[in-house]
């Protein structure tokens, strides 16, 4: 019976699902490699390339997060014929989060057996079109995987509660292990889920007692619990131990929480408590509105409807209350922590998208008895979804690296792409391997873009002999660098990210040879 409820039988619903998934694919995969790599993407791409090339990886508890991102990207690189760091491409890196982003949309459709066909379809539509979900599903970061694994874990948990058994216990354990191996913020997800379950028990204690008695009397509850825990621990251990090559990695996985606590209170990414609310409520930038207020407003209606006494005892309301309390708890925790970046919104905002789907249906249900209001409501909802899609497209393509885009957080500017193009042109006219020296503390993502040039070095301070074929430095060290240069250079100013400018010097004779090829 449970299996049949996952199936879709009506052609109209199949068409709607196809349209939603098609929109998700188009928004996430189109022009995937045009935006310059963010600093974080470049660092993680470099680590993935080293793993691809050498097979070596060690989890670093002080930075870079969990290992699933690197290991799960390897099959995609292999399928594209990439075997080394130099061969690895931006497209191969971003394929994984884009696939996970579409997976989030597809996974949300399986909520239909718990919250209903229409709410789950609209939830999938909001997830497919949300600017936050789209933008960060196009970045090589952990969050798209984290959202996907969290949603799948929730599905298995709901399946288990409805029909306890070994298979959903294994599914939940596998998902939980992947969540833990993806990012340290898994702790926040766990805390919020426990809080949501405790809140649901407090809301409906009689139902909780009934379920507990039935579960204890008729099912192998202890077995299922140990199986889920064992599977989760095994999956997490395999990833953090580099598949048994570095067993101490599992200890590092837990020490990471102490490093994270220190990072959260002292960082350049410190923001006021209302930062995330500002991203959700929106701004007027680049001459257009960028806001997810539609999702926020409908999600509030969805959770209020789930708490309505007349609907409080049904399975959909219970599931929506758990999702709602978990999402709001996460938002509260993230808002309390001083360390803030916009991609951290992906997990709680995904929960809001599910609630928005339910809220939309609640409004349409009220309007249904009156023909014209029902039609007007449906048109307004469609227009709102379309506007989200337009926002997502603009934010992820035309304004993907624009400093005015609130989602383009310390994003590498498009101007930087001149550097690898310029170096490639210089290498083509040089009669030997180029020597490239990079000076300064801010240079990522240059190591990614210059990864094919073996005679490239990076210094935080200026060495005694700084001369090279190409010198790249930040503007702040010019007064110390200039007196040490013995050769003549042609200099260009190229942007790295907002507020950071690089000076790219090319040895004069090499520059003249390069310019001659352009005439």
Image (cartoon, grey):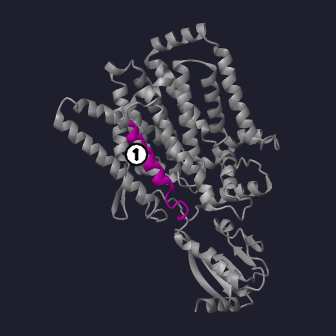
Q: Which residue is drawn at the image coordinates 43% and 19% (left, top)?
A: 203
- Marks counted in the figure total 1
- Is 223 magenta? The answer is no
Residue 38 lies in quadrant: bottom right
Residue 429 lies, in percent from the top left, at 70, 86
**Image spot of residue 300 (x, y percent):** 36, 36
Q: Residue at x 57, y 12 (%)?
A: 215
Label 1: few (<14), some (14–19) or many (≥20) C-alpha neighbours in 10 Å: few
In reply to whether residue 28 is colored magenta, the answer given is yes
Q: In terms of secondary structure, where does tag 1 sit?
A: helix
Kindly tell me whether residue 475 is visible in this rendering.
no
The residue drawn where x is 65% and y is 45% is 260
Residue sitting at x 69%, y 23%: 227
Relative side of 361 to 88, left or right: left
Secondary structure mostly seen in the magenta stretch: helix
Image position, residue 69 (x, y; %): 65, 48
Q: Is residue 376 left or right of residue 237?
A: left
| Magenta-drawn segment | 13-35
In the drawing, does residue 475 fall left or right of residue 378? Answer: right
Picture layout, residue 340 above or below residue 373 = below
Q: Which residue is mark 1?
A: 19
């Amino acid at each position: 019976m449970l299996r049949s409820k996952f199936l879709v039988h009506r052609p109209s619903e199949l068409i709607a699902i196809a349209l939603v998934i098609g929109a998700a694919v188009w928004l996430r995969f189109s022009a995937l490699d045009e935006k310059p790599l963010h600093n974080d993407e470049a660092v993680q791409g470099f680590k993935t390339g080293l793993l691809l090339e050498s097979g070596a990886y060690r989890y670093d508890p002080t930075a870079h997060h969990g290992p699933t991102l690197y290991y799960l990207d390897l099959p995609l690189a292999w399928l594209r014929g990439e075997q080394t760091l130099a061969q690895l491409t931006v497209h191969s890196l971003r394929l994984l989060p884009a696939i996970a982003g579409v997976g989030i949309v597809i996974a949300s459709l399986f909520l239909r057996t718990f919250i209903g066909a229409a709410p789950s379809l609209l939830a999938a539509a909001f997830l497919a079109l949300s600017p936050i979900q789209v933008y960060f599903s196009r970045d090589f970061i952990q969050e798209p995987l984290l959202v996907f694994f969290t949603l799948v874990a929730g599905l298995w948990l709901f399946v288990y509660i409805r029909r306890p058994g070994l298979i959903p216990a294994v599914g939940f354990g596998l998902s939980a292990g992947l969540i833990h191996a993806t990012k340290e913020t898994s702790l926040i997800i766990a805390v919020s889920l426990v809080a949501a379950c405790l809140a649901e028990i407090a809301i409906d204690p009689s139902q909780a007692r009934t379920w507990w008695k039935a579960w204890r009397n008729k099912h192998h509850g202890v077995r299922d619990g140990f199986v889920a825990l064992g599977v989760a621990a095994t999956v997490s251990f395999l990833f953090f131990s580099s598949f048994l090559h570095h067993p101490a990695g599992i200890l590092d996985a837990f020490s990471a929480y102490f490093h994270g606590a220190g990072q959260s209170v002292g960082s350049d990414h410190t923001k006021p408590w209302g930062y995330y609310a500002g991203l959700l409520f929106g701004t007027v930038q680049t001459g257009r509105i960028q806001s997810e207020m539609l999702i926020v407003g409908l999600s509030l209606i969805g959770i209020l409807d789930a708490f309505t006494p007349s609907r409080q005892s049904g399975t959909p309301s219970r599931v929506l209350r758990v999702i709602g309390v978990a999402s709001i708890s996460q938002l509260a925790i993230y808002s309390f922590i001083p360390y803030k970046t916009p991609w951290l919104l992906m997990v709680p905002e995904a929960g809001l998208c599910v609630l928005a789907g339910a809220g939309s249906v609640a409004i349409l249900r009220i309007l249904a008895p009156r023909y014209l209001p029902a039609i007007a409501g449906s048109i307004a909802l469609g227009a709102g979804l379309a506007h989200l899609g337009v926002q997502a497209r603009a934010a992820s393509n035309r304004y993907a690296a624009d400093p005015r885009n609130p989602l383009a957080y310390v994003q590498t500017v498009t101007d930087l792409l001149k550097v690898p193009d310029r170096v490639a042109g210089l290498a083509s006219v040089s009669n030997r391997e180029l020597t490239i020296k990079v000076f300064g503390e801010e240079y990522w993502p240059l190591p990614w873009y210059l990864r094919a040039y073996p005679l490239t070095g990076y210094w935080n301070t200026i060495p005694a002999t700084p001369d090279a074929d190409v010198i790249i430095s930040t503007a702040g060290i010019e007064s110390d660098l200039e007196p040490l240069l013995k050769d003549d250079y042609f200099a260009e100013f190229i942007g790295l990210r907002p507020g950071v400018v690089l000076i790219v010097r090319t040895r004069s004779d090499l520059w003249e040879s390069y310019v001659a090829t352009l005439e």
